[in-house]
Amino acid sequence: MKTLYQQIMSNINTLLSNLSSNDSGLRDKSAIELMDIGNPIAVKPLIEAIKEPNNINHRGTLVYALSNFDCSEHLSFLVNLVLTGNFEVSTGAFQIINDIKLNKKQIATIESSLDKSNELKEHNKEGFHELLKLIGQ
């Protein structure tokens, strides 16, 4: 008989596996459940699911699921989402960044990413300007 810990980990592993599913409904449901569980083991698999090219039009919920975790180690990735994602992805990533208590090194990381940004869509320009405000520029 499995212990409670083993049952929980088995459930988490199933949810993590579902992040690779081609079924966006299953993927999104699993992402929300992982968010609710709050185990930080979910951060990297969520990011990998967001990066998956086949998910390009189905990333909003995956980004939202990241909002329950400390994503400060993934700041450059989040800035990139603000600058390149669709409206939902861009605003979701910005909100995650906005909730981080930024230190000087993180502010420099954002500045560096902003310096490299090229032509942006209108909603990404708005995100760009919001990031500038956030870092005091």
Image: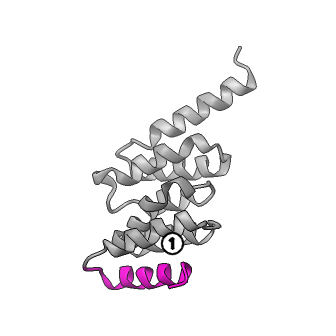
Queried whether the magenta region covers residue 131, the answer comes back as yes
The residue wearing badge 1 is 94
Q: Look at 55% across and 80% down and name the residue there.
A: 134
What is the x, y in percent for residue 65? 55, 56
Q: Which residues are magenta?
A: 119-137
Q: Is residue 108 above or below residue 15?
A: below
How many other residues sit within 10 Å of disc 1, few (<14), some (14-19) or many (≥20)? many
Q: Residue furthest top?
A: 1
Q: Is the magenta region chiefly helix, strand or loop?
A: helix
Q: Look at 31% across and 74% down and name the residue there.
A: 117
Q: Is residue 13 above or below residue 54?
A: above
What is the x, y in percent for residue 93? 49, 67
Q: Look at 33% across and 50% down and name the residue there.
A: 52
Taking the image as shown, residue 121 lies to the left or right of residue 14, namely: left
Q: Residue 8 is drawn in which quadrant?
A: top right
Three-letter amino acid code at the position of disc 1: Phe
Taking the image as shown, residue 66 lies to the left or right of residue 59, namely: right
Badge 1 element: helix
Q: Look at 41% across and 76% down and name the residue there.
A: 87
